[in-house]
Amino acid sequence: MTPPATAPAFLARHGWAGARITPLAGDASFRRYFRVADRGRSAVLMDAPPDKEDSRPFLFVAQFLLANGFRAPRLLAADLDEGLLLLEDFGDRRMGPTLACEPAREEEVYAAAVDLLLALHRAPPPLELRPYDRAELLREVLLFPEWYGRAAGIDADLESYTNAWDRVWGDVLAESDQRPVLVLRDYHADNIMLLDESAGPAGLGLLDFQDALAGHRAYDLVSLLEDARRDVSPRLAAAMVDRFILGAGVDDAERFRAAFAVLGAQRNVKILGIFVRLRDRDGKRGYVDMLPRVWAHVARNLAHPALAPVRAWFDAHVPQELRAPWCR
């Protein structure tokens, strides 16, 4: 986590000469983050190597969120050729670590996060966003056989695997086409900052939304409640799904719950592949420690009747000993 060599000159050009640069927690991408401190002010330096990361989608979605009253980090300076962005600093009160220290606030904070989604879905998504369509859903679930399956020695039949998924996401795709919403795609406790009540909807700040698409309204709710990084109790998850259904005016609750399960399976199976890829391709070994929790999510997802074809595929091709116990 050494700052890029070009950082001091970049900061000097934008009024931060001599500022102290210290590392912040990174994410699963090639981006790195640093806190920049100077004379009582602070900002966040994002290092996104342009040969590996395109920062323009981040800036586009941030602008949309800010224009619609949500709290995304404001851009202070940028050099896209060098892959450097200087952003507003939201501080250190991430939702996950804060709730670990203040567990009594869990229901209150999750309710605020659900309410933010409800508000976000009232704003039509930008027309420029790509749809979260079949091609994208399929590309993501194929990460499981490509990375997890290969590492575990699973001889996957890709044709039957694809056919199983195609049999379960028809309703999801139909609603995504008819009433798409902005899907942030990584809306979970480590990407939500606790600010204050005057800071926009629910007093929450948003991070890591550069991969946003236009898709189904259940997706980010799944991301929030089926978190790879922390446990959410079944009671709290059920209460938050009920809160969303009521707040969104969902007219067919069972159909929505089925879509929630399908998207949960799709997302969590994708994560199984991504976390093994992070270990095997990128040398980031810590992510596989979370795989038992992700497998528990998959098991709950596959128990829903809407996932019967996918459950049958997993039962036929992925024995129990190659699931949660194997992945460490």
Image (cartoon, rainbow, N blue to C red):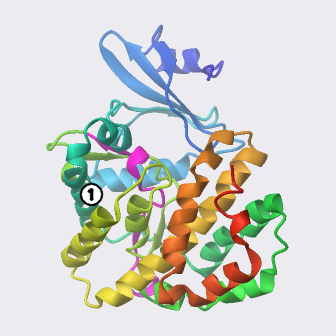
User: Residue 158 is drawn in which quadrant?
Assistant: bottom right
Q: Position of residue 215 (x, y in %)?
A: 46, 74
In this rendering, position of residue 71 left or right of residue 85: left
In the image, residue 233 lies at what x, y percent? 34, 60
- Which residue: 63% across, 19% down? 2
**Image-based side of 242 in relation to 277, left or right:** left
Depth check: 302 or 242 in front? 302
Q: Give yes or no for residue 181 being in the magenta stretch.
A: yes
- The answer to whether residue 100 of the structure is visible from this angle is yes
Residue 236 painted magenta? no
Identify the residue at image location x=55%, y=70%.
Answer: 298
Q: Quadrant of the N terminus?
A: top right
Residue 284, picture quadrant: top right
Count neighbours of disc 1 (C-alpha within 10 A) and say few if under 14, some if 14 to 19, many if 20 or more. Answer: some
Please report the residue visible at 22 percent of the width from the left and 70 percent of the height from the top: 243
Residues 179 and 84: in front is 179
Magenta highlight range: 176-194
Q: Which residue is mark 1?
A: 68
Q: What type is the residue that disc 1 sits on?
A: Asn
Secondary structure type for disc 1: loop
Number of dots carrying numbers? 1
Vertical placement of residue 322 versus 77, above or below: below
Which sits in the foreground, 77 or 125? 125
Q: Residue 307, relative to residue 130: is it above or below?
A: below
Residue 25: image location, x then y, percent:
51, 32
- Looking at the image, residue 58 sits to the left or right of residue 99; the answer is right
**Residue 200 visible in the picture:** no
Residue 250: horizontal and vertical position, in percent? 26, 84
User: At 24% across and 64% down in the image, what residue appears?
Assistant: 119
